[in-house]
Every structure is written in C-alpha cells, then in structure tokens.
Image: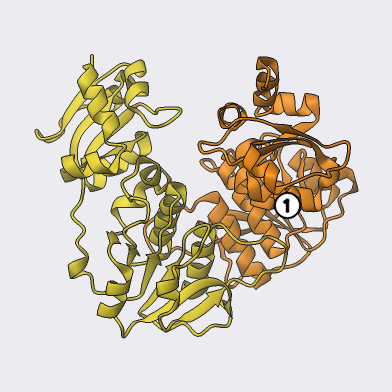
Chain colours: A orange, B yellow
Amino acid sequence: MLSKSEIKYIQSLSHKKFREEEGLFLVEGVKMVEELIKDHLELIDKIYAVDEWIELHPAPFPSNVKVIRLEDFELSKISSQQTPQQVLALVRLPENTIKKYQPTGITLVLDQLQDPGNLGTIIRTCDWFGVNAIVCSPKTVDVFNPKVVQSAMGSVLRVPVYYTDLIDFFHQHDKIARYNAVLNGESIYTCKWIQPCFIIIGNESVGISKSIMELKSTNISIPKKGNAESLNAAVAASVILSAIVR
Amino acid sequence: MLSKSEIKYIQSLSHKKFREEEGLFLVEGVKMVEELIKDHLELIDKIYAVDEWIELHPAPFPSNVKVIRLEDFELSKISSQQTPQQVLALVRLPENTIKKYQPTGITLVLDQLQDPGNLGTIIRTCDWFGVNAIVCSPKTVDVFNPKVVQSAMGSVLRVPVYYTDLIDFFHQHDKIARYNAVLNGESIYTCKWIQPCFIIIGNESVGISKSIMELKSTNISIPKKGNAESLNAAVAASVILSAIVR
C-alpha cells in the first residue's frame, strides 16, 4: 500500500521544479519500461508495477532497483495517463551537458516550442532520421515532462536534448549553416543543404524569435499547394528533415 | 446565466452519439470561430462568448445565429479545453457523402487511426498539401471529436473526411493505385508514384489491417537512418505526402 506522501511525491515529478530537485523523471507503460530495462537499467531508481507485470518480469534486478508491487487503483493515482498500463518507473535524469557538444550532421534547434506532444514527436522523428541532437531555447517545454516522454516513445534517452541560450550557442558555432523554417522562404525541395547545419523551428503560434531572425541564415519553407495557414510544428520539422536526409 | 441543462447539452456534444443525434459539433477559440464566421457562417447555430469577444464582434449576425453572452466560469464548464479562449460555437455537421466522391489526385486513407490529435494534424497537413479527401475506416476516430477539430485548426471544414468500409471502397475504385505505408516497403524517395492514388496509413499500434494488406498494392516506407522503432502516424503521413507532391 502506497502512503499518501509517496503518492504525492511521485505526482510532484510531473513538475519540472521537482524533477530537477530530485534528479528523477517518470517513464510509464509496459513497452517503454521494457526498453528502459534493456538499454538504461543503470538509470532506473524504482519500478512501481501491478501483479500482472511483476509475474512476467521476475527478478533478479540489480540491487539498486527497487520493484514495488501496487494495486490498479494506486497506479491510477500516480499515473499521468488516462489509461495507466501496469507499470511506472522513476528514472534518474541523465546528465546532458551542452558544453561538450560538437555539432556534426544535422542539429535541430527549437525556439520556444510549447506543446509537449510536439516535442515528444520531434524527438521520435529525430531518432528515426538520425539527427544528432536537439538544442532548445530555455523557454521550450521540458524534455522530461511526462507528456513529452510519452510521445517520444523510447527515443527520449537516445536523442540528446540540450537547453541553452540560442544566440550564445549560435555565436559559439558561427561557422555552421543555419536554416530558419518560415512561411515565405526558399523551397526545401530545391534548397542547397550544407552540413553540419542547424535547422531552426519556432514557437507554435509566433514562429522564430525576432533576435534569431535577425542573424544571417537561410529562410526555408515547405511549399504550400492547398489552403491551410500553417503546418503543425512537429510535422514541419519532420518534413524538412526528410527533405534533407533523403 | 446558462442553465444546468444547457451546460449538460453542450458537454454532451463531445460524444459522437450526441453529435449525430443533434447534427451539431463544437468549435472553440477566437481564431477558429473567426474563420468559421468568414467561411461557413451558414453552418453556425449558436455562439457562446464572453464580453471581451462580443465587444470586438458586434452584430449584425444573420438572424439564425444566436450570440449568447456568458461569464468566464461558464465558458470553462462548457469548454473541452484546459484554457478556454473567449468563444465557443455550436456548428451544424456538414453533409459529406462518399457516394458522390470521385477520387482524383491523392486520397489519404486511414485504417483505424485512434488518436484525435493525429487525425486533426493529418487533416491540417492534407489541407496544406492539397490532398482532395480523407477516407477513413468506420473505426477511425470521429472527425468532429473536439480534439480533432482543435488540432485540425481551420482545416476541418476544408478537407472532406468520409467514413466507409475500406474493402468495399477499394473494390469500387479498383483501377486506382494503392500504396500501403509499412515498415519494410519500397523507399518513398525512389518509388514511382501514380496518380490518382490512395495512400493508406494504419492504426498507431498495429498498422494496416490484414484484410487490406492482402490486396494487391505497393508497400512503401520512409527509410530509417537512426534507431526509433516507428514514426508517429501523422508524421509518417506528412512525410509521405511531401515526397509525392514535391
């Protein structure tokens, strides 16, 4: 039986402030916890699971991984999903420090992306297309937000996601080609891609910040044939990546 | 002041059964209602709005459009959004009958897509790339689900979305080229695209149904360079459409 304070503690990890204080984030669901055990056992702190899961996953786990049995109704309380799936893990935040990052190939840059589903989907797409890293402005949604983790599927620990001041970052790497995704740029189908490069995707409603647009870059667009005003940010990022790596 | 029964009535429209009984669906938010007034005034039944919106949108509306003033807390009750935005409209369901649909160009076909955000994003992408219509299996999520409407942005009334038995539909149009989006098909970058065509996207977890896979079609894939197991369904659809229309 989980105590009230333990439930509250786990729930608190849906907030960035507490994740950073505790150095932990949440991973949910049979498939994702399976991948975690396979690839990142060293990061797992605790596993909360119902009988059904425990029977299929007998010990031994390393001694530092505690497996805690709980009832369905308890899982519902600590889960951030509408339909909780058997298991939830507390996972140690990996240490991603941008200082060591040397951009090669494609780096995706996100300027104030707000929607957690979009960030998760973008991480998954980057993992598919072999993008090396994602660099985000400090105000972009946090990569360890439970909804980001969920929509990134297993990719959240495979693609490094960094947070930093973008203007500083561009100044540090001013030899690298920059491409701004905008609505009235050069067609992505005919544009000449230089690598290494930064592909910059802006906020869902206001696009790329003025201070970034003022830097010398190539403005690129996905040609429109129909009537929509814009594309979803994750879709735009994916279509652009596809045009580069094809 | 909204009555309890009126609140309940509006809330009920988040369920497909009630939408079909009443012939109405919900559209929320300043921007979307604005587009609706501009392009589909004839479909609007009622507008519920707070003072702020009403002041900026003075009458005259046609006499068949009732504008009802309400308080923020009332809007929160009838809204399906976490942060309601000033206005919500009850809109008459358009009559989309597939019988008259003659496939030309690209028709996107969705086999049991479940996630409303994915369907909405796909509608928006189809509107961007000029796809003529979307044909869905009967078990695909309903296009007038509030979350679909929201993520489709203004595109939900611009791209016709039909629901029908897909096997019957393919038999009726058996001269039209079919492409199945799968994980081990021909590269979308080198594949020869014939139009008119059907691009078939399967369910988020199990893919395209066996009965459809057994039909004679071309299997196509987005080549993978990294490690993700799969792509989000809306992303896959968008990347494929981009490869065809480029």
Return the x and y of residue A160 as percentages of the image width and height: 78, 49
Check disc 1 and report the residue beneath it: A35
Front residue of B90/A1: it is A1
Q: In which quadrant of the rendered image does the N terminus of chain B lie?
A: top left
What residue is shown at x 16% (from left), y 44% (from top)?
B42
Return the x and y of residue A4 as percentages of the image width and height: 65, 16
Answer with left or right where residue A32 lies relative to residue A206.
right
Query: A245 above or below B149?
Result: below
Residue A157 visible in this rendered orientation of the protein: yes
Q: Residues within 10 Å of mark 1 (few under 14, many from 20)?
A: some
- From this viewpoint, which residue is outermost toward the top? B1
Q: Place residue B23 in its image quadrant.
A: top left
What residue is shown at x 78% (from left), y 53% (from top)?
A38
Q: Place residue B17 in its image quadrant.
A: top left
What residue is shown at x 79% (from left), y 24% (from top)?
A21
Residue A96 visible in this rendered orientation of the protein: no
Front residue of A161/B35: it is A161
